[in-house]
Amino acid sequence: MLFTVLITLYVLICVSLIVVILLQSGKGSGLSGILGSGGGGQTIFGARAGDMMTKTTTVLAVCFMGFSLVLALLSARQSSSLVGEIEAAGLEMPRSEPLAVVEGSPAPAAPGEAAAPVPPAEE
């Protein structure tokens, strides 16, 4: 349950970080030029939007890194294999049986070689 909530918050932080970065004007007009204000996205949100966007980017980047570390630690503790879960439940793993060679079927060949037919057994 906690892991699911953290993953959801992590995805929201990622999307928010992408949006904030794309709204900032760089050397070119970037995505902020699409918003229709020729001067960039910062003027749409007010004169202090440049500082706000920079601080928002910094906060979201720190949250992104923090959530990455927390999720990595939680997933390392929760990691388990399917084989371990089956054995813990007291079930047996299915065993594969060797394949029988049927008369007239091709014999297994080494990689890169053509399979040779098996001669029929004489009775």
Image (cartoon, rainbow, N blue to C red):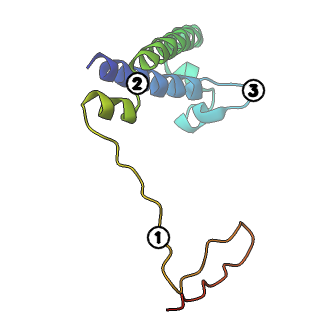
**Going 48% across and 79% down the picture, which residue do you hit?**
102
What's under tag 1, amino acid-wise? Answer: Ala
Is residue 23 or residue 109 the one in the foreground?
109
Vertical placement of residue 97 versus 88, above or below:
below
Which element type, helix, strand or loop, lies under badge 1?
Answer: loop
86 w.r.t. 118: above or below: above
Q: Residue 12 carries which label?
A: 2
Quadrant location of residue 105? bottom right
How far is the residue under mark 3 from the one under mark 1? 69 Å
Q: Which of 44 and 24 is in front in this view?
A: 24
Amino acid type for the residue under numbered disc 2: Leu
Q: What element carries label 3?
A: loop
**Where's residue 83, x and y in %?**
38, 35
Q: Position of residue 9 (x, y in %)?
A: 37, 20
Dot 1 corresponds to which residue?
A: 100
Of labels 3 and 2, earlier in sequence is: 2
